[in-house]
Amino acid sequence: MQEQFTLIAPDLTGINAWRYQRQISGGIQEYMEAISFQHYLVNQTLITLEEAARSLPETITLTGDDYILGIFDLVGELMRFAITTMATTGTLPGSKGAETTADDRDILIDLRSLRTSFQGLDTTSCGGTGLGKDVEKKMEVMKTCVEKVETAVYGMIVRGRERPKGWVPDLAEDRSGAVESY
């Protein structure tokens, strides 16, 4: 991605810095989603606007709008990661199981914290940036993503009590045969 940003950087300097902002915005949001997901997997924290901006060439501007909209998209990646991890390991990413203390965090706690922070945004004062209308759509998707993880955790807890301790799905089973259907 760095090479791609370097190639377009000359078109985004000087008077053109804001001229093409709308055209590049979607790509920067996708980039934000990717680097914030990587940052979360490595550090279990949210990447800051400053850290994210430093990851781009100096001539590429990371706007607050693109940062926030990229973080909204991060929630979907975290949801998919949490659901996949629970389905394959039987545990929630970041949780310590029975050893969990009040200081421990897991991905659901982080998702709920993001949801609370996003719900506190004042989108009515976003004026002509376009953030307000985009945030409305992404807010609904974000809420649904967090609810999916909450539902999966609830199901894991309830079903977990029905399974033997340490149960994990057998993923090594040969599934190359025909699939039965009704």
Image (cartoon, rainbow, N blue to C red):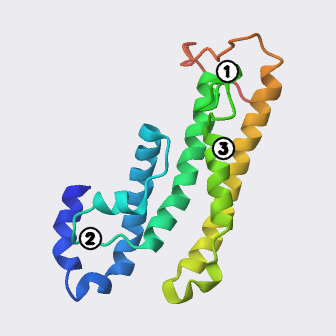
Residue 170 occupies quadrant:
top right
Q: Is residue 182 visible?
A: no
Q: Is residue 3 visible?
A: yes
Determine whether the residue tagged by mark 1 lies in a helix, strand or loop: helix
Residue 2 occupies quadrant:
bottom left
Label 1 vs 3, first from the N-terminus:
1
Disc 1 vs disc 2: Cβ atoms closer than 8 Å?
Answer: no
94 sits left or right of 108 in the view: left
Quarter placement of the C terminus: top right
Q: Which of 55 and 179 is in front in this view?
A: 55
Q: Mark 2 points at which residue?
A: 60
* Vertical order, 37 against 50 (above or below): above
* Amino acid carrying mark 2 in the image: Ile
140 sits left or right of 58 in the view: right
Crowd band around label 3 with a 10 angstrom C-alpha radius: few (<14), some (14–19), many (20+): some
Q: From the top left corner, tell me how far across and down residue 70 is, in percent.
A: 47, 62
Residue 99 circle label: 1
Q: Which of 176 and 182 is in front in this view?
A: 176
Residue 109 circle label: 3
* Vertical order, 46 against 130 (above or below): above
Q: From the top left corner, tell me how far across and down residue 147 is, in percent.
A: 73, 49
Crowd band around label 1 with a 10 angstrom C-alpha radius: few (<14), some (14–19), many (20+): few
Label 1 vs 2, first from the N-terminus:
2
Give the residue displayed 24% in from the left and 85% down from the top.
Answer: 16
Q: How many numbered marks are there?
A: 3
Give the residue displayed 37% in from the left and 65% down from the top.
Answer: 28
* Vertical order, 117 against 160 (above or below): below
Determine whether the residue tagged by mark 2 lies in a helix, strand or loop: loop
Quarter placement of the N terminus: bottom left
